[in-house]
Image: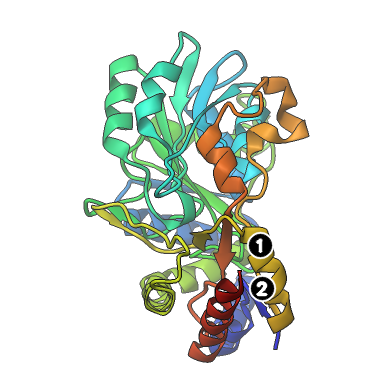
Amino acid sequence: MTTRVWDYLAEYESERRDILDAVETVFNSGQLVLGESVRGFETEFAAYHGVDHCVGVDNGTNAIKLGLQALGVGPGDEVITVSNTAAPTVVAIDSTGATPVFVDVRADDFLMDTGQVAAAITERTRCLLPVHLYGQCVDLAPLKELADRHGLALLEDCAQAHGARQGGTPAGTTGDAAAFSFYPTKVLGAYGDGGATITSDETVAKRLRRLRYYGMEERYYTLETPAHNSRLDEVQAEILRRKLKRLDTYIAGRRAVARRYAEGLAGTGIQLPRTVPGNEHVYYVYVVRHPRRDDIIERLKAYDIHLNISYPWPVHTMTGFAHLGYAKGSLPVTEALAAEIFSLPMYPALSHDLQDKVIHALREVLQTL
């Protein structure tokens, strides 16, 4: 049996009736766009985080883009973030007309090195955009202090951190706003694309709602541009409402998988994920590190195990962002990680048998290196 880093079929089998009932609920509702399912999910997702507003959008990239625009970021501005992330984080910044500015990450937990942020701030800096990578939070206290001192917006990229906490505070509730993705692989995943931006600032929320709907508050009258159609689909919203009730159960399942990896791979010489003190990790992906990464991945194929790299190319090295002018070696930790990190299978429905297969195969491969 082929083993991959993610599979939704076992989960779907156990939740099939509820998922199909969600579809039937929407189809029988009489309203297929921005109806009760979107409104209901927005209310419930905001309540889960203890914030006042949630605005559902069509994907996580636009959740970031619209969040930046609603916070006043635009052409000529700079946004400080990291290159060790999925490209959509930076694509969203670029699409506002702002310039991404990168700081490096830490070698032990792969998160933004917040000690480098102050030196990256210029008179053009408008926003700090930490990425809560792989399921745990960036150290937010120093970023919040810098944002307050310099009058900057703080937008949290929570695409990989649904339900994560830092010092008991939910991810996404420290900054001015936070962006989430509901891509199917996520901790809270839809059955297609989806996203949301949360905030407790009513002015930001009102602008978010206009920006996702052609700049309109009333039909056919546009109040501001640039704005597009970025609405969350009713079917995906209703599915997310059902799955939100199970989010804490999903997280518990991921943590159980992580514990079994930690026990099964102890003493192998592979660098396992480190949880930052005060963080509550949700393990969106289980990322490990080894200098012989490529050899390991290739040899595991003989066991019919196919792994993933999150992420093989730092954003600043991509051709599409060559115009930013970052030379090779400019972010040394990020570049070193890209050559050594890889992801093991991680999802709540991962069976003990499949996980044991991965652990045993990985231990055997490591012994042959």
Q: In what element is the residue under mark 2? A: helix
Whether residue 60 is situated above or below residue 270 in the rendered picture: above
Q: Earlier in the sequence, mark 2 or mark 1?
A: 2
**Residue at (68, 60) in percent of width and height:** 294
| Camera-nearest residue between 132 and 16 | 132
Q: Amino acid at mark 1?
A: Leu
Q: Amino acid at mark 2?
A: Phe
Q: Position of residue 275 (x, y in %)?
A: 33, 57
Q: In what element is the residue under mark 1? A: loop
Q: Residues within 10 Å of mark 1 (few under 14, many from 20)?
A: some
- Left or right of 267, for residue 194: right
Quadrant placement of the C terminus = bottom right
Whether residue 197 is situated above or below residue 360 in the rendered picture: above
- Left or right of 299, for residue 270: left
| The furthest residue to the front | 368
- Left or right of 175, for residue 333: right
Count of numbered labels shown in the rendering? 2
Query: Which residue corresponds to mark 2?
Result: 27
| Camera-nearest residue between 303 and 23 | 303
Q: Quadrant of residue 99?
A: top right
**Residue at (54, 19) in percent of width and height:** 78
Say whether marks 2 and 1 touch (CB < 8 Å).
yes
Q: Position of residue 307 (x, y in %)?
A: 65, 68
Q: Quadrant of residue 149?
A: top left
Mark yes or no: residue 110 visible.
yes
Q: Position of residue 314 (x, y in %)?
A: 63, 40
Q: What number is the disc on residue 32?
A: 1
Q: Position of residue 33 (x, y in %)?
A: 64, 56
